Image (cartoon, grey):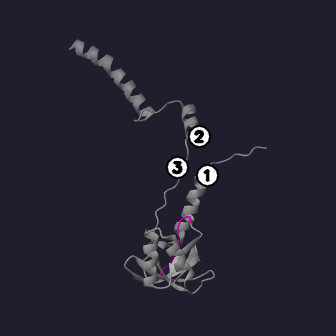
Amino acid sequence: MKNVLKLTGFILPIVLVLTFLWVKCGKNGSQIDKGTQKTESLTQKKQPTKVTVKYLTEIGTEGKLFLEGAKHVIVAIDKDALDELIDAQVAKDTEGIEQLVRSPRAMLVLNNTHVKIIDKGFAITKIRTQESLQEGKTVWVPYERVVYAKVIDEKKKAAMESLPIIEVRK
């Protein structure tokens, strides 16, 4: 019995010290030195904020016509023209797309234009533009082109957050 108590008295402090170090360092074994942690956090690149896009589909709702990275969005005057436009885009037929835009069956609308959903079909949406040169035009677009206006602001914020911070000293 005496040997067991001696062994316990010897092992118990070691277990306590190892447990303390494991908790203090974190379960993944990171550095204890705060200076090292500060240096690591300064050299790591900031991850961009992930934005979940919310598409609008309900008739009567208002949002923005949006295509990421584009200055304009191509819209179609009717469902048949939209089918042709989608087929041309899938086939990467730039000449066919240009012909549609030059015809009266499709047109360019500024990206981020305020719109209202007035009808919908399977994976397509009929919208009325609420601003820009095409104000009041009724056109058809793929449903994923109409998003909540808040999404655009979040994407801009995420882009700004991913830029490096430059400190200017006088």
Say whether residue 64 is visible: no
The crowding category of the residue bearing disc 2, from other C-alpha atoms within 10 Å (few below 14, some 14 to 19, many at least 20), is few
Q: Is residue 110 magenta?
A: no
Mark 1 lies on residue: 163
Q: Quadrant of residue 109?
A: bottom right
Instruction: Decide which of tag 3 and tag 2 comes sooner along the chain.
Output: 2
- Residue type (three-letter) at the residue carrying disc 3: Gln
Q: Circle 2 sits in a helix, a strand or a loop, which is it?
A: helix
User: Which residue is drawn at the image coordinates 49% and 57% (left, top)?
Assistant: 50
Instruction: Decide which of tag 1 and tag 3 comes sooner along the chain.
Output: 3
Q: Circle 3 sits in a helix, a strand or a loop, which is it?
A: loop
Q: What residue occupies the far right of the structure in this picture?
A: 170
User: Which residue is drawn at the image coordinates 58% and 39% (left, top)?
Assistant: 43
In the displayed structure, does residue 56 sit left or right of residue 5?
right
- Quadrant in which the C terminus appears: top right
- Residue type (three-letter) at the residue carrying disc 1: Leu
134 or 53, which is in the foreground? Answer: 134
Separation of residues labelled 3 and 2 (CA atoms): 13 Å
